Structures are given as C-alpha cells and as structure tokens.
Amino acid sequence: MPVDKDLEGNESSPSHTIEDEPYSIYTPREKWFIVALIAFGGFFSPLSSNIYFPVIPTLSNVFQKSIELINLTVTMYIIFQGLAPMFWGTLADSWGRRPMFICCLLLLSASCVGLALIPTNAYWLLLLLRCFQAAGSASTIALGAGVIGDISEPAERGGFFGVYNIGPMAGPAIGPVLGGALANTLGWRSIFWFLCISSAACAVVLILFLPETLRSMVGNGSIRPPALSRPVIPLIGRRAHASSRAPLPRKPFQNPLRLLLNADIFILLAFNGLICAVFYGVNASVSTIFHAAYPALNETQLGLCFLAIGGGMLIGSATSGKILDWDYQRVKRGVGISEKEDNSFPIEKARMRLMPILLAFYAACCAAYGWCIERGVSLAGPLILLIGVGFFSMAIMNATQTLILDLVPGQGSSVTACNNFVRCALSAAMVACIQPILAALRPGWTYVLLAGMCVLVSPLIYVVMRIGPACRARRRARAAGS
C-alpha cells in the first residue's frame, strides 16, 4: 500500500491526505489574529535596537567613551542579532514556535533589568548585556516568519508578510522617538525599564493567546499539541474538528547554515543583506549626522527625526505586501498555473520582477540624502528622503523575505534565521565602518558610495530568476530521495 505524505513530507495515515484537509484550519479572521500576535512579538526586535540610537551622544558622555566605542555596542548588538536566530529559529522548527517566542521575550526582559542598573564605569558590562539583549529580542522576527509559513499558502503570504512587518517596522518608527523622549525626561536608564516592562507584558499576552502552529507538530492546526504548547485561553481554532492523527515525530535539530549551500538561497540572502547593510548605514548614523548638521536639535527632536525613516518603512510594509500578492496573481494568470498546482511555476519571477524599479529609487534616495546633509539644506529635505529610504528598503526586503520563505516550505524559521545572520553580519560591518567613512568622504560621497553598492548587486536579481527553477528542482529531487 502506498504511504501518504503530510504537509511537511512526513508519513501519515493513508486516510488523511492533503486533498482531504485544508492547508490551515484557521479562518481568515483567525489567521489575522495570529499575525497580529506575532507582529506584537516581532515589534521588540527593532524597538530594542532603535530606541537606543538617540542616546548614543549621551552615553558617550556618561560612560566617557568615544562615539566609535559606543557604536561598538550597536555593532555587537547586530552581530548577536544575526547569530541568535540560528539557535532559536532552528529550535522553533523542531520544538515549536510558541515556547521559543516566549523564552526570547523573557530573556529580553531580564537583560533590560541589568542594562537599567548598570554602573557608568562598566563599559564592558554594557557591551555584554547588549549581546544578551540582542539574543532575546532578535529571534522574534525569524519565529514570526515561521508562523506565517505555517498558516498561509503562497498566494496569500505576501499580504500576511506585509501586515506582519508593520509590527517589526514600527520599532524604527517609534523607537527613536520613545528613546529620545524618555531620555530627555526620565534619563537614559528609563529606556531599558520601558523595554523590560513592555516585553514581559508581551510574553504574558502570547502565553495566554498564541497557539502552536509548527506543522510537524500540529499539522494544519487540527492535531492537539502537548499541554505546554497550548494557549491558556484558546480563543481561535475551537470550531475545527480535531484530527484523529497522532502528533508527528519531532524533527531532529538541523544546522540551518546548510541552507546556504543552495545557490539561489545564498544569492538572495547576500542581496538582501547588502540592502539591509545600506539601510543601517543610513539609520545608525542619523543621530550623529543630524546632531552635527543641525546642532540646535535636542534628544527628543533627534528622536523625532527617526519618524521619517520609520514612517516610510511602515508605509512600505503595509503596501508592498498587497503589491506582491497582486503581482503574484498577474503572473499566475499569465502562465495559467499556480505553484500549488505545478512546481514549474516561476515563483522567482512573481516575487522579483518589480525589484529593479524599487532598487533604482532606493539608490537615488540614498545618494540624494547624503548631498542634502552635505549642503546643509533645510531639515525638510533629508527628512523627506529618509521617508523614501525607509519605504523602498522595506519593499525590497519584504519581497526577498517572502520569496526566501516560498523556496523552503517547512523551514521558515531556519531560513529566516539564515537571512538574519547574513544581513546582520553585513550590517554590523557597515555600522563599524560608517563613522570612519563619513569622516573621510563626508556625507555626500559616503551615500553615493552606498547607492553604488546597490547598483552593483542589481544583476543578482536576474541571476536568481534564471537559476531559481533548476535549484528548486534539485531540492525536490533530494527530498524525494531521502
């Protein structure tokens, strides 16, 4: 008798096939509720990073260290922001999304207690605790991406990603404003107390309401998980009929770095990482550049300047997901098949064909921003261009992240962890060297250089569209052989 495969490719009962059950038992409204919960959790990764930026000049004075040394705490944060999801994300693909989400938020809350109480003569401890803070906060984005892969099909995934990213992208929008306002009124330590309380509150919300979605554990949501993986208050999924299938065997812990051996995935991650590094080259230097170019700005006003780039990211996140789904449907109508129906569906083309236009606008905004700062134009000029930088960076990264998730279904958290690793490694290098580059080239030519980097990697878009289908076919063949 032939053995059927479940949605993750594992053996299941012959009486339960993919055709018998929907991809997910959750209604559209319940899916949006799950997306809202994970967006709330994902909010703390960029918030923990960006709430820190406006107080960099203050910390330089308080700890009596140079701006370069305080920037090193940002660099270390970004490094651990890339490393931590490799651990948490892979555990989530094996042990479940829900417990890893909660553990990350509790670690973030505990590390912020230490940062709030740190003595000002212990710069080394500031570095160390920032690493723990990153280890707790950074993985929530990778975990959230895994949840979206669990509950959504490719045709709707772009829209969910767009709305989900509103949570993580709200951090760059309001984090610096909160950081500047709190530091200006209650002192710089108050930003860490705020993070401690808010992240602990988020952990409580997830404990109460977030269901387990890992498909190797709960299938399409119809398999009852262990008690610790069930929400205290099960608001959603209650109308579904429970499946008679037993829980599937837990996946073994796998090294997520093996995904980098796939040429199409490696190229996508490298492309996305460089776009993110350029973004950090702009974002991490806003407070120091604006402080030098517009010395009348205080900490609160410096924080408000970050609203421009964060607001652009919010708009880009909210709109780009819908555009992705719209373009997916256009390609689907053009070829007459969907990815679910035929593995030859050109998913790379559906996700990437608008990328050259987005990349051109992104590079133009970066270059123009640098020259506005160089010439000391009205504050409105660079702020408007920061909106463009935020918008187009988010549109580009949303498209690539959605495609990355499409390419390796069932390993959403692991591949997103690889994505974080690559982009954080490149971003950390950028943050470490942006200040010396600014000192040598000044803002105008510095951001022309960053824009040129974006132009240089643009051919990778066409490389992915060309080699992607063959790479997917090889992965399917290996999976069938194993």
Image (cartoon, rainbow, N blue to C red):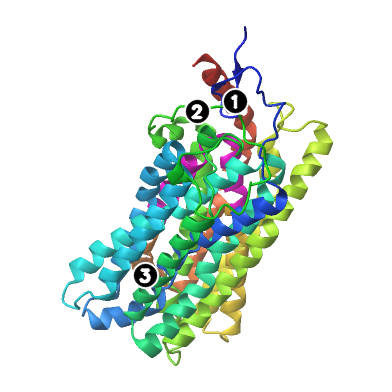
Is residue 328 visible in the rendered image? The answer is yes
Q: Which residue is mark 2?
A: 248
Q: Amino acid at mark 1?
A: Asp
How far from the left and from the top, in percent, is residue 146? 53, 44
Q: Quadrant of residue 194?
A: bottom left
**Residue 423 painted magenta:** yes
Q: Are marks 1 and 2 in contact (CB under 8 Å)?
A: yes
Q: In 3D space, how far apart are the residues under numbered discs 3 and 1 (Cα atoms)?
A: 41 Å
Q: In 3D space, how far apart are the residues under numbered discs 1 and 2 (Cα atoms)?
A: 10 Å
Name the element at disc 3.
Answer: helix
Is residue 418 visible in the rendered image? The answer is no
Q: Amino acid at mark 2?
A: Leu
Q: Residue furthest left?
A: 121
How far from the left and from the top, in percent, is residue 69? 26, 70
Q: Earlier in the sequence, mark 1 or mark 2?
A: 1
**Image point 29% across, 70% down: which residue?**
113
Mark 3 closeness class: few <14, some 14–19, many ≥20 residues within 10 Å: many
Quarter placement of the N terminus: top right
Q: Quadrant of residue 89?
A: top left
Q: Which residue is mark 1?
A: 6
Q: Are marks 2 and 3 in contact (CB under 8 Å)?
A: no
